[in-house]
Image (spheres, rainbow, N blue to C red):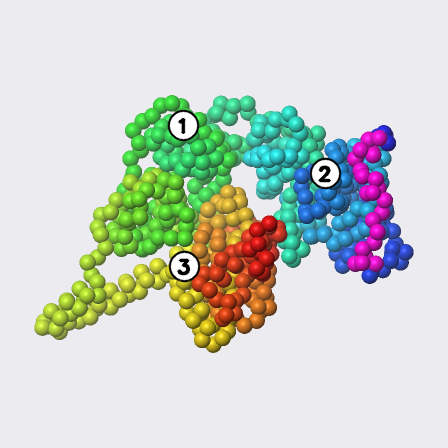
Amino acid sequence: MLAISFVASLFSPAFLHAEPPSKAVSARASPAQLRTIATVREAHDLSNKEAARSYPIHLRAVITFLDPTIINGERIGMFVHDSTGGIFVFFPRGVFGAVPPGTLIDLRGVSAPGEYAPVITMRQLKVIGYAGLPTNPHRPSLGRLSSGEEDAQWVELEGVVHSIVEEEGRINLQLTMDDGPINVTMVREAGAAYSGLVDTKLRIRGSAGATFDVQRTQMIGVHLFCPNLSVVQIVKAAPSDPFQLPTIPIDNLLQWEQAPSLAHRVHVQGRVTLQWPGSAVCIGDAAQGICAQTGQKGRLRHGELIDIAGFVRVEGSAPMLNDAIFRSSGSADAPAESVPVTAEKILAGGHDSRLIRIDGQLLSRDLSSSDTTLLVNSGTSIFKAILPQSLSGPQSKAWENGSLLRITGVASVQIDAQRSALGLGTAVPKTFRLMLRSPADVLVLRRPSWWTPSHALIVLAVALAGTLVALGWVVLLRKRIRESQERFRHMALHDGLTGLATRRLLQDRLHIAVESARRHRTGLAFLMVDLDNFKGINDTFGHPAGDEVLRVTASRILEVVRSSDTVARLGGDEFVVLLSGMNDSRMAEVVAQNIVRNLARPISFDGREMPVSVSVGLCHATSEELDGDEPMKNADAALYRAKERGRGCYEVFTPAFLIQP
């Protein structure tokens, strides 16, 4: 049993007495009219509507997780467990010191609706002693965890650690189970070493917690909260040096014989064909190539022989390594020669992750992307060529639309998931992209066509003196030129990925909307929409999945606005909605609310569910208030406040937002 002095040091005297009932509580049924709940299961099984009635709760339970650094406003949370199950408990800040998991407490409080399932708001607490953590964990699958049926329960999971992120006060692991990955949060212990857990197969216990949409009180994912290393059992230790693992030929990685080893890191070797420092590195051996996602930033030479250790996943039709580390052998060879190919040959297979060379016409570039992204036409295919901003140079800005280019890069083929699923398991390629090493990978073979409208008129004047055949040829030529101009104009004004308006078209529409509002004495509204944690989606699911999220986001925003409104994409994950002729600010709020709701649904890609949410900043302005770009700046200030509120919500601009604290 803990000493009374220890108890007093953990809790303030005022907190050991029940709080006076608030006005909201007194308006409901009084505690005398409601039964007292004495078990965790009974409290957790309430509906959120019933939990809002503030049932009195008195029970004994063991603390299974408490991290004082995780704060929701003025409250801190913890998971507790009794013989019937687990539940989440809120209590005010400044109450706890360091309380070891396994502490037995006598808890008094009231029920309350949580962001997903019912919770307890603590009113009074007394430490009884140390009882130890539960010894009877559930052993659910990831599918059952994701259904929400195990919310707040004490569970045991088994999987391989793929990555570790160390923060102040806590450790975040990505644990890959047999049926998928799950994030694990653990309280950080002073002096403990965690980096060696990568590639270790663990059996770990903790409290299952929901990742939720605050606005809709819906579960969109699952998390495991683990108290400390005492509940971690090593099933299979990671190799002390992953580079001592047997070297696997790249083209053997996804073959049947290697299947037993793919749950853990694999070791491959090859010569560097591409490096994006801090992001990716690609290598090739005698038969095949492979790319790896890595956070290492040390510069490598093209042709340098390196070893890579990482976890295998499939990217399109080829293997890729995630959470990889690399080591140079110190030797270098002549850089790999690129192979000249056509788009048809790339899609036919055999060139994925290899250094290739292809000719094509530059159609446009994505000016809203932070990276240099070219849209290129070759034969009957249109593909992207990507060069990170950190590797771009001034020459990359000189490439003109319509130019014939010779592009060198590492190919990445994307698969048509739907058509592949309808077949007998054979991958059906859809498109591809090229990863570039530097601006030198783009060679201009021919500048844009000489033909312009003025030149076409000259040809027409000459053709009028010719034969009817020549006249027909000129007419056909003019038609093709107009079509080409219209295609390039459309590409310049519309985002190549989502089809939405670009910043240039948005400015034109805004100018028209402002003039119309002033003329008819109406108003307009601006909505800044930003995807929450978009970088995490790219890092977890890959850039093709990120592109799919951007496309679906654009489609879902268009579903809730009028055909006369303008939806634009400004940056990688930033969208703008211009509501013209909007007199009633409440109608604009309805649109913002519908966008948040519509974007809270998970997005499916390649058989996986990706949780998404957006934050929205709203500014409504009447004709008298319109002043240049002020509505857009105010909407951006409101978006910042929505992010501060916790994301997954919208915020309406008020002048108070511009007052500095």
CA–CA distance in space, label 3 to label 2: 47 Å
Circle nearer the N terminus (1, 2): 2
Magenta-tinted stretch: 5-26
Is 447 one of the magenta-colored residues? no
| Most distant residue in the bottom direction | 520
Distance of mark 1 from mark 2, alpha carbons?
43 Å
- Residue 542 horizontal/vertical position (percent): 48, 45
Please report the residue visible at 75 percent of the width from the left and 49 percent of the height from the top. Answer: 119
Mark 1 nearby-residue class (10 Å; few <14, some 14–19, many ≥20): many
Residue 561 drawn at (x, y percent): 52, 67
CB under 8 Å between discs 1 and 2: no
Q: Nearer the viewer, mark 3 or mark 1?
A: 3
Instruction: Left or right? Give the position of 615 relative to 285.
Output: right
Residue pointed to by mark 2? 65
- Viewer-nearest of labels 1 and 2? 2
Q: Where does label 1 land, which residue?
A: 306
User: N-terminal of the two: label 3 or label 2?
Assistant: 2
Which residue is at a point 67% across and 34% down the rendered structure image? 187
Categorize mark 3 by other alpha carbons within 10 Å: few (<14), some (14-19), many (20+). many
Q: Tell me the residue at 22%/47% (across/down).
A: 445
Residue at the image position 89 percent from the left and 58 percent from the top: 33
Within 10 Å of the Cα at label 2, are there few (<14), some (14-19), or many (20+) other Cα atoms? many
Closer mark to the observer between disc 3 and disc 2: 3
Which mark identifies residue 502? Answer: 3
Look at label 2 and name its amino acid: Phe
- The amino acid type of the residue labelled 3 equals Thr
Q: Name the amino acid type tagged 1.
A: Ile
SS for dot 2: strand
Q: Position of 537 compared to 201: left or right?
A: left
Of 421 and 535, which appears nearest the observer? 535
